[in-house]
Amino acid sequence: MCLGCHGTKGMSKTLSKGEELSLYVDPVQMRESAHGDFDCSVCHQGFSAEDHPEKTFSSKRGYSKLFSGACTNCHTDFKGIHSVLIGGEVGGVVCTDCHTAHNVKPFKFSQESQYCLVCHSQGIHLNFGDGAQLPLQVDPAHIEQSIHRDLTCSDCHSDFSPQAHPQRNFKSKRDYTVASSQVCKTCHFEQYTETLESVHSRLPAQGNEDAPVCLDCHGSHAIVPARETKALTPPICAKCHEDKYSAYKKSVHGAARISEHNADAPTCSDCHLAHKISDPRTAEFHLLVPEICGRCHSEEKLMKKYGISSSVVKTYNQDFHGITLGLYKQKGESKRVAVCTDCHGIHDIAKPPSPNSPEVHAYLAKKCQACHLNAPDNFSASWIPHYEASFGRAPVVFAINLLYKIFIPLMVVGLFLQILLHIWRLVIKR
C-alpha cells in the first residue's frame, strides 16, 4: 500500500533548511533486498495507512540519524567499532551510510572488500596512545595491483568482519606495525621462520624497537610480486641503512641497477638474502664472502656478457688466501683471511681505470698493508692477482704454465711407454 505513493518517481519532501529529500522507493530493489519480506511499519514505526503523521526535519542528516536508530530494534548484537560509530564518537556515522536504506543486500551476496571499503576508502584514521595517528584509508587501485588482490580483507584481518569489528588499542604506531606483521606467518611460515634466525630479529632484545618487520619492507596493501621486489630493495633498505645506500648507488653495482636499470646487477638481497640475514660483522659471514660473490662472478655466461673473467673465484681458491680460507672452513674455525671485500670494497666497489694503473697498485698496497704491516709500497706489484695468466697479462707465468701443461702429459705418456717396454723386454727374455 505504501508503494502506491512512495513507488512514484520524483516524490520528495522539502526540508526546513531547503534540502530536497527523495521519498521514492524502488519496488524492485526493495523486493530483492534483505528486508524484502518486511512490512514498511517494521522500520517506520508510527506510520500506517490510517495514521501518517507529518514529520519535520531540518536536514537530510537529521532524518538519517533518526531512522537509523530503528535498526537497533532488530540488530542488537552490533559490536566493536559499530557501537562507537553509531554512538557518534567518530563523525556521527550511522547505519544507512554503509548499508543504505531500502536496498540492503544480504551479506552472503555482498563482496567483503567492497563492504570494508565503504569506510576504509574515506579519510578515517586510528589514534594511538602517544597521540600519533595512522591513516586507515585504503586505495582500491593498490589492492588491485597487489599480489594479494585475490584475497579477502578477513584473510589477513581475521578478527574483523561485518558482524564483529573489535576496537584495538595500541600504545604507538610501532606497536601496531609489529603486531600486524604477525599475521603474515599464517601463509608465509617458512619466510617468517627464516626471519627468526636473522640479525634483525635479535635487535629488539638489544633495545632496538625499530628493527624491521614484514610491513616495514613489504608494505601492507600495495605488495608487489616477488619478481618486481628486487628493483625496490635498495630504497627499502635505505630507510635504515642510508649510509650504505649512498655508497652503493655510486658503486659499479648500484649505478648499473639504479641508473641503468640493469636487472643483472646485484641488490642488497642478492648478497645479504631477504629474510635470513646474517650479521655481516661476524667472522662466519666474512668467510662466506667468496661464495657470495661467486654466485654471479663464477657464472660464465653472465660474466662473458660484460667482458669479465669468470675464473676469479676459482683462481682465488687456488691462491694462498683461498687455500688458507678452505683449511679454516674444513676445521670449522673462523679466522680472519683476506677475501673479496678486503681488496675490492663492499658497497663502494668501483670499476678500476686499468688493472696495472698506478692508482690501482697504490690502492692495493694500502689494502695489503692492513694485514701485512711491513709490506713495501710495491708489494702488490710482485703478486700475480687471482686471474688466469695470459700472454698479455703475466707472460712469464703464462709461458711456464704452458710448459708444464705440455711437459707433464708428455712425461706421463713417456713413463707409461717405459713401463710397457720393460714388460715387453721381460716377456722376450723368457
Image (tube, rainbow, N blue to C red):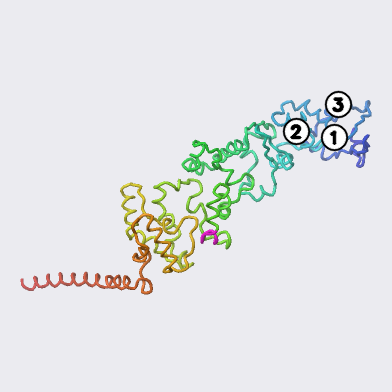
How far from the left and from the top, in percent, is residue 240?
Answer: 56, 46
Q: Is residue 197 left or right of residue 23?
A: left
Q: Residue at x 65, y 51 (%)?
A: 145
Q: In the image, what residue occupies the spot 86% across and 29% down?
A: 44
Q: Earlier in the sequence, mark 1 or mark 3?
A: 3
Above or below, 106 against 235 in this view is above
Query: Mark 1 — residue?
Result: 61
Q: Which residue is mark 3?
A: 45
At label 1, the amino acid type is: Arg
The quadrant in which the C terminus is found is bottom left
First to last magenta residue range: 250-256
- Residue 105 x %, y %: 76, 38
Q: Report x, y in % for residue 169.
A: 64, 31
Q: Nearer the viewer, residue 258 or 262?
A: 258
Find residue 34 and report its image quarter: top right
In the rendered structure, find residue 93 and report the number of the disc placed on it: none
Q: Point out residue 315 in the picture as x, y percentages from the top left corner.
A: 36, 62
- Is residue 13 in view? no
In front: mark 3 or mark 2? 2
Amino acid type for the residue under numbered disc 2? Val
Q: Which residue is mark 2?
A: 90
Position of 271 relative to 358 (above/below): above
